[in-house]
């Protein structure tokens, strides 16, 4: 995933009435330059371990990248960041460390530090990680690359079948994907999934889905590797109650 970083400036004008100074405002509480990635916040799924690529606007030379990750305000860089950062030669792109074992329901904030033509810079990224079973689409402001284009999918009570999922891209998909279906925040896979997944080119055929309860909403997750990188796709399933309006 490639992220484009932006810098947003906030200008605050403090006005004093009748020529008197206004000493009640702490001017140190608002920064003049907020440097957050344009795609922030970004959606993440628990179980995905992956890195990001951040593209920084400008023409200078980037160097000396470092990063830190905070989970609910606590520095977890030592346990949830792996691997090394890099900057491809001559590029304005920073490859982050790999985000590993992010916990559903937690809030994450990543800080990427580097120099741009020798000047110290920082970019910030908010990562939203909903619990499995919590519909990620509840976060419409988050950039979401993991939801399949065809969803939500309507499956009636008593209906059974598989779904073919096409994954955009050009890499090789791993031969051993896994799948689960959640009803609410409970894993219902043992009751509604049977058979095996299969991979053909850039397409994954799901397990057979059956036995869904009318009037219920489900979320299906498919975990796999794409050119060796851990990733996931999800889709919502709507199962109407027969006879209901």
Image: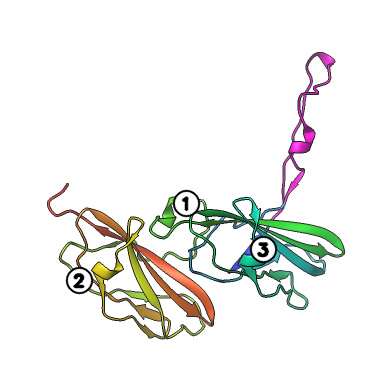
- The earlier-in-sequence mark between 3 and 2 is 3
Mark in front: 3 vs 1: 3
- The span from disc 3 to disc 1 (Cα, nearest Å) is 27 Å
User: Could you say which is closer to the camera, residue 167 or residue 221?
Assistant: 221
Q: Residue at x 72, y 41 (%)?
A: 10
For marks 3 and 2, give the CA distance: 44 Å
Residue at the disc numbered 1: 140
Residue 187 placement (x, y as % from top left): 33, 63
Classify residue 12 as left or right of residue 169.
Answer: right
Give coordinates of residue 95: x percent, y percent.
68, 71
Tags 1 and 2 touching, CB below 8 Å: no
User: Seen from this angle, which residue lies furthest top?
Assistant: 18
Is there CB contact under 8 Å for labels 3 and 1?
no
Q: Nearer the viewer, residue 78 or 40?
A: 78
Q: Write down the residue under mark 2.
A: 160
In terms of secondary structure, what is the magenta stretch mainly? loop
| Element marked by disc 2 | loop
> Is 23 left or right of 143, judged from the image as shown?
right
Q: Image quadrant of residue 211? A: bottom left
The one of 17 and 182 positioned closer to us in this rendering: 182
Give the residues drawn in magenta, as a range.
6-34
Q: Which residue is mark 3?
A: 77
- Asked if the residue at tag 2 contacts the one at tag 3, i.e. Cβ–Cβ closer than 8 Å, the answer is no
Secondary structure of the residue carrying numbered label 1: loop
Q: Residue at x 50, y 79 (%)?
A: 226
Residue 89 drawn above or below residue 118: below
Q: Residue at x 47, y 51 (%)?
A: 139
**Secondary structure category for the residue under label 3:** helix
Which badge, 1 or 2, comes first in the chain's sequence?
Answer: 1
């Amino acid at each position: 995933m490639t992220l484009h970083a932006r810098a947003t400036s906030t200008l605050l004008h403090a006005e004093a009435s009748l020529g008197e100074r206004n000493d009640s405002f702490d001017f140190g509480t608002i920064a003049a330059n907020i440097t957050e990635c344009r795609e922030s916040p970004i959606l993440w799924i628990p179980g995905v371990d992956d890195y990001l690529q951040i593209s920084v606007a400008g023409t200078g030379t980037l160097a000396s990248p470092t990063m830190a990750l905070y989970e609910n305000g606590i520095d977890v860089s030592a346990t949830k960041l792996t691997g090394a950062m890099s900057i491809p030669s001559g590029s304005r792109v920073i490859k982050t460390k790999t985000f590993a074992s992010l916990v559903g329901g937690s809030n994450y904030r990543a800080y990427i530090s580097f120099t741009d033509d020798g000047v110290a810079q920082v970019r910030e990224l908010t990562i939203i990680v909903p619990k499995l079973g919590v519909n990620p689409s509840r976060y419409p402001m988050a950039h979401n690359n993991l939801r399949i284009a065809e969803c939500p999918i309507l499956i009636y009570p008593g209906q059974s079948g598989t779904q073919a999922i096409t994954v955009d891209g050009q890499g090789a998909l791993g031969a051993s994907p896994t799948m689960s279906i959640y009803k609410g925040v409970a894993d219902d896979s043992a009751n509604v999934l049977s058979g095996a997944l299969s991979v053909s080119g850039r397409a994954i055929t799901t397990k057979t889905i059956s036995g869904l309860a009318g009037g219920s909403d489900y979320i299906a997750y498919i975990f796999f590797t794409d050119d060796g990188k851990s990733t996931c796709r999800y889709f919502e399933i709507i199962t109407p109650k027969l006879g209901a309006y």
